[in-house]
Image (cartoon, rainbow, N blue to C red):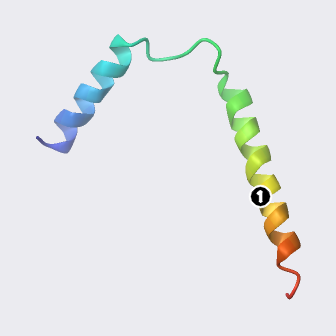
């Protein structure tokens, strides 16, 4: 089974299951991910005080 045929089957499966969820707003999801990554960056820089 090649990669393109596997990808095509997964796309068909996702479309059959609905594809998108009503409650997942891409802007909110992306904003939350950005906030979490910035928080992790801030925590990392607080522990790295020897620089």
Q: Which residue occupies the foreground of this view, 20 or 43?
A: 43
- In the picture, measured across the screen, residue 24 lies left or right of residue 20, that is right
In this view, 29 is above or below 14: below
| Quadrant occupied by the N terminus | top left
In this view, 34 is above or below 19: below
Which quadrant would residue 33 be assigned to in this image?
top right
Q: Position of residue 2 (x, y in %)?
A: 14, 43
Q: Which residue is mark 1?
A: 40
Q: Residue drawn at (69%, 36%), measured in percent from left and top?
A: 30
Q: Position of residue 23 (x, y in %)?
A: 65, 15
Q: Indicate the secondary structure of the residue bearing disc 1.
A: helix
- In the picture, measured across the screen, residue 12 lies left or right of residue 1, that is right
In this view, 45 is above or below 27: below
- In the picture, measured across the screen, residue 43 lies left or right of residue 9, that is right
Q: Position of residue 51 (x, y in %)?
A: 85, 87
Q: Residue drawn at (24%, 29%), measured in percent from left and top?
A: 8
- Farthest residue, direction front: 47
- Farthest residue, direction left: 1
Q: Which residue occupies the foreground of this view, 43 or 24?
A: 43
Which quadrant would residue 7 be assigned to in this image?
top left
Which quadrant would residue 4 be assigned to in this image?
top left
Q: Residue drawn at (88%, 71%), measured in percent from left and top?
A: 46
- In the picture, measured across the screen, residue 12 lies left or right of residue 14, that is left
């Amino acid at each position: 089974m090649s990669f393109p045929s596997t990808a095509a089957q997964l796309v068909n499966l996702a479309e059959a299951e609905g594809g998108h969820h009503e409650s997942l707003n891409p802007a909110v999801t992306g904003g939350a991910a950005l906030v979490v990554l910035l928080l992790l960056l801030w925590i990392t820089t607080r522990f790295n005080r020897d620089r």
